Image (cartoon, grey):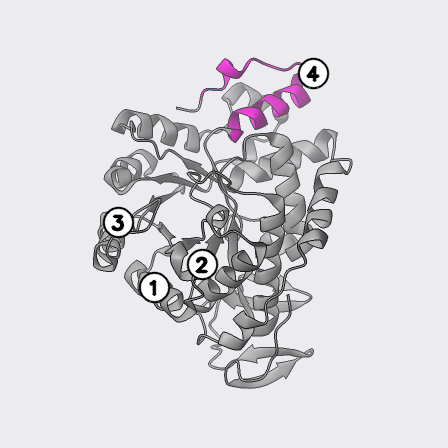
Amino acid sequence: MAAKNGGRYVVSEIQNGLIAPIHRSPDDKILATLSGRDLQPNRGIALNLDWIAEARVNTSAVERRAQTLVTRRTVKKEWQAAWLLRAITCMDLTTLSGDDTDERVRRLCAKARQPIQHELVKQLGVEQLCIKVAAVCVYHTFVETALRALEGSGVRVAAVSTGFPAGLSPLEERVAEIRRSVEAGAHEIDVVITRAHVLGGKWQALYDEVATFKIACGPAHMKVILGTGDLLTLRNAARASVVAMMAGADFIKTSTGKEAVNATLPVGLVMTRAIREYAQETGMAVGFKPAGGIRTAKQALEWLSLMKEELGPSWLKAELFRFGVSGMLADIERQLEHHATGRYSADFRHPMA
């Protein structure tokens, strides 16, 4: 992608050839570093239509680059175990089914608190790491159940909102839904954009929508679900990513998990490069969450490799990278058990909920 610097927003300094925004406070948190430059959390910027119009994606080049992540020789032995443990700490364990119950959510929360069986933790010798997932993601109805089940664990509660998964209910209802989840105690809100704004090139409407959601989220972190499987082109995914970040997204997320096509490495590559460009231009870091269709330990390693190579080690932490998963943890446990014992266990020995 390419974009001009001129006219984007008022700037006060140019450091290392990169534009930095004004109003930087010495108390701002350093969330990440990129090319030796400290990055603050995203506060959003004014909508710039030139930046969006000039976004370009070479689809064939993106697909070739993504394929290298699949065909290369992966990490092995203790290095693979370490990467898989890191993957667990970046998981949003998710249950978003029509037959969800309080008991299912409580069981999922128990798994979130102790994602690896005690015996396996001892065999791996990682007791001191206190491995747990980053968050549990549920419908609003189960926010209070999850909060009670996770109390004192440090695992966060995320609620899907804004008419998930279609995002087509009236704006007032979607905003009210966010506020109810925040008032109930949700730490994070996964919001859904109106895909028609992207398909129709209505960038001001998309920006206003996401900015409105951000205000309603208040102190809660906002993950913006683009529904990339519905956006038809990688260029649309790139432009939607930029608009969401301009409007103040803390994370951009690929999918609801309900689309016919969910998280793919090519769309992940496009979104992470949009994050990198935004960081270079603004001095602010935005997180990334692939979700939907990620089920194996091998896929976890591919996504971690993508993050490390495109954005660097700063993004390999829960503050800036999440997996939206429901079944991948079981396969990771099986791989870790194989590392510790030399044997693969049956899937039923690693229930999720």
Q: Which residue is mark 3?
A: 181
Q: Which residue is mark 1?
A: 209
Marks 1 and 2 sit apart, C-alpha to C-alpha, by 15 Å
Q: Amino acid at mark 4?
A: Gly
- Residue 109: give its label: none
Mark 2 highlights which residue?
199
Q: CA distance from mark 2 to mark 3?
A: 29 Å
Residue drawn at (62%, 59%) of the image: 273
Q: Position of residue 118 (x, y in %)?
A: 50, 22
- Magenta residues span 328-351
Label 3: which secondary element: helix
Which amino acid lies under the numbered mark 1 shown in the image of this protein? Glu
* Depicted 125 relative to depicted 22: above or below: above
Mark 4, residue position: 342
Q: Are marks 4 and 3 in contact (CB under 8 Å)?
A: no
Q: Residue at x 48, y 52 (%)?
A: 231
